[in-house]
Structure formats: structure tokens, C-alpha cells
Amino acid sequence: MDSKPDVKESSEKREIDERTNEKDKDKEKDKDKKDEVTVTVNEQPVKLRGDSATGADIKAAAITQGVQIQQNFVLQEELPNGTSRIVGDTDRVKLREHLRFTALAPDDNS
């Protein structure tokens, strides 16, 4: 009985497994890119992941990515009709490309 065919089969199987693993990794990277959305906060791009985010999530991501705001700033979503709406820290926003937000320092009326 010759053991060489087993070595060849094992080598081929290993090669197929490696290619499958590479394809799976590529699919994961593509999925990550699809899950990533770029919005604008104070005219600066901010990348977010997922289907939705809270106002606090959006501000935290913006801060992490270098936008000069603070977590206590008031977040507004700029709407296509030229108006805006306040997004509270616990309010959820459905994420999609090209959303625009403005973060403003809270008024200090003391």
C-alpha cells in the first residue's frame, strides 16, 4: 500500500481549506465595509457601524475620530428640507450615507 496518495490528498485538502478561509475573511471584510456608514458631524466625516446609533453614540464616534466637540454638546440632524431636529443622547437614528449633523455647545445661561 502506497502512502503517497494520502499525502497528496491531504495537501490538496489543506490548500482548499486555506482558500476557503481566505474567501471567508474577504467576505467578512466586505461585510464590515457594508456595515460602515460615513456621516458628517460639523462638516467632518465620521464613520459609524450598524443599522442605527443613538445621539450619544454619534457624538462619541465623532470625538474619537477627531471632531472638536464634547459629549454634552447638543446634536442636531440637518434635514433635506433645510430644517433640523434635535437628536437626544438616547434617541436612535437609522444610519445611512450622507446624514449630516451639527453639534453645538449647550447654552450657558447662568
Image: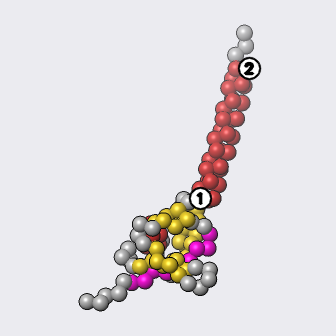
- Which residue is found at the position 41% from the left and 70% from the top? 89
**Residue 40, percent across and down?**
55, 76
Residue 79 visible in image:
yes
Q: Residue furthest left?
A: 110
Q: Which residues are magenta?
A: 97-105
Q: Which residue is mark 1?
A: 35
- The relative height of residue 108 versus residue 93 in the rendered view (above or below) is below
> In the image, residue 105 lies at what x, y percent?
39, 84
Occupied quadrant, residue 49: bottom right
Discs 2/1, front: 1
Image quarter in which the N terminus is found: top right
Question: Which residue is label 2 attached to?
Answer: 5
Circle 1: element type: helix
Residue occupying image coordinates x 69% and y 30%: 13
The quadrant of the rendering that contains the C terminus is: bottom left
First in sequence, mark 2 or 1: give its number. 2
Q: Are marks 2 and 1 in contact (CB under 8 Å)?
A: no
The 10 Å Cα crowd at callout 1, few under 14, some 14 to 19, many 20 or more, is some
Question: Does residue 19 lie above or below 65 as drawn?
Answer: above
- Give the distance between the C-alpha atoms of the residues marked 2 and 1, in whole angstroms: 45 Å
Identify the residue at horizontal 48%, vertical 65% (top origin). Answer: 92
- The image shows residue 75 at horizontal and vertical percentages of 45, 77
Task: Please report the residue visible at 59 percent of the width from the left and 58 percent of the height from the top.
Answer: 35
